[in-house]
Amino acid sequence: MGILEWATNPWGQNVPIHIAWFLIWVSIIAGLLFLIVHATWLRFFAKSRQFASDTSPAIAPKIPKHVPRHSLVARLFHWVMAASMFTLLFTAFLPKVGVQFNWVTYHWIAGAVLTISILFHIVHASFWLDFWSIWPDKTDVQDAQRRLRRFFGLSAPPPRKFAKYPLENKLFHGVIILCGLAAILTGVFMMFRVRTIFFPRNPYLFGDMTWGLMYVLHGLAGVGLIALVMMHIYFGLRPEKQPITKSMIFGWMDRDFYLEEHDPDRWAVETSSISQPSRVDDRGLHDAG
Ligand code: HEM
């Protein structure tokens, strides 16, 4: 049983046509295993987290009660993307596991919404948000080494508190970019195989082998996204992560959570003597006005 399905084209060549659909179950089981192992580890074995230094007592009272984290535009993008991603996953994979319906139209429409929302996100993040906040920096790498050494019982100073995004979130974002872009780029070409409102159908754009490999890459990225989305939802629902999830709904997180996990030197929020909820601009900066 291979991981690809093959067919013979009219010229007698053996070409891949798509991934073998049992990979859907491989991804679901891998996702579930990750959740079980992680939840068991946290419940029974993990020690409480320690950070290097406490935030200076002079800074703490100046942090607003509600620390701005995601602007309205960033939150809207996130939920549009989530809705299109769910639609894509369900329309793609339900028919493969026996739930038959006319899925292709819903699928390419959701694909177009995802593509446009990601293009928007790239422009928004590059010019309006703090572009570098989601990429690992030197401190992340040093702290990852410290955490690893401490995990194996070796001596190392405790890691520092996080910037806006912990290393795990940054790595997850990187993997989602790889799978997401692979699904989007191949998906845009695959729209030439079906009737859409964007361009005339042209199944002869590529040869059989190129089309086959494109469907394979689309499928691999798609099944990868099943496990990634499962992990993302699992973390979003975990009690200790709920302040982060809430911030994706309301735009802010509590001062206490910010001070516990984040380093004001690495993620600066505008300090203020006024402890009131405030407007959030697109960089996530606090605006007391
Ligand atoms: C979460 C992301 C996505 C997943 C899980 C996914 C999954 C799939 C799967 C499994 C298929 C069936 C392919 C086959 O039979 O080998 C498919 C087909 C298709 N996908 Fe996606 N896809 C995603 C994103 C996209 C995007 C972003 C687009 C468009 C920009 C798109 C456009 C298409 C089209 C047009 C087809 C139909 C091709 C045909 O029937 O010939 N997909 N997708």
Image: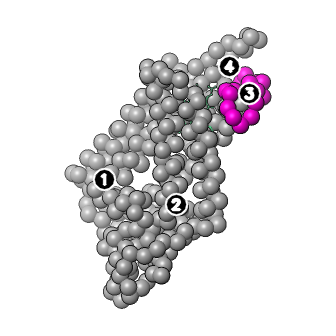
Please tell me which residue lies in front, 211 or 69: 69
57 drawn magenta? no
Check if mark 3's residue and mark 2's residue have beta carbons within 8 Å: no
Check if mark 4's residue and mark 2's residue have beta carbons within 8 Å: no
Q: Which mark is residue 201?
A: 3
Can you say whether 20 is above or below 114 in the image?
Answer: above
* Region rendered in magenta: 193-210
Which is more N-terminal, label 4 or label 1?
4
Q: Residues within 10 Å of mark 1 (few under 14, many from 20)?
A: few
Which is more N-terminal, label 2 or label 1?
2
Can you say whether 157 is above or below 117 in the image?
Answer: below
196 drawn magenta? yes
Task: Point out the quarter of the image occupied by ligand 1.
Answer: top right
Residue identified by numbered label 4: 15
Which is more N-terminal, label 3 or label 4?
4
Type of amino acid at the residue the image marks with label 3: Arg
**Residue depicted at x 45% and y 27%:** 94
**Residue depicted at x 62% and y 17%:** 6
Q: In 3D space, how far apart are the residues under numbered discs 1 and 2 (Cα atoms)?
A: 22 Å
Type of amino acid at the residue the image marks with label 1: Arg
Q: Which mark is residue 238?
A: 1
Type of amino acid at the residue the image marks with label 4: Val
Q: Which mark is residue 165?
A: none
Q: In 3D space, how far apart are the residues under numbered discs 3 and 1 (Cα atoms)?
A: 45 Å
Give x and y (percent) for residue 267: 47, 74
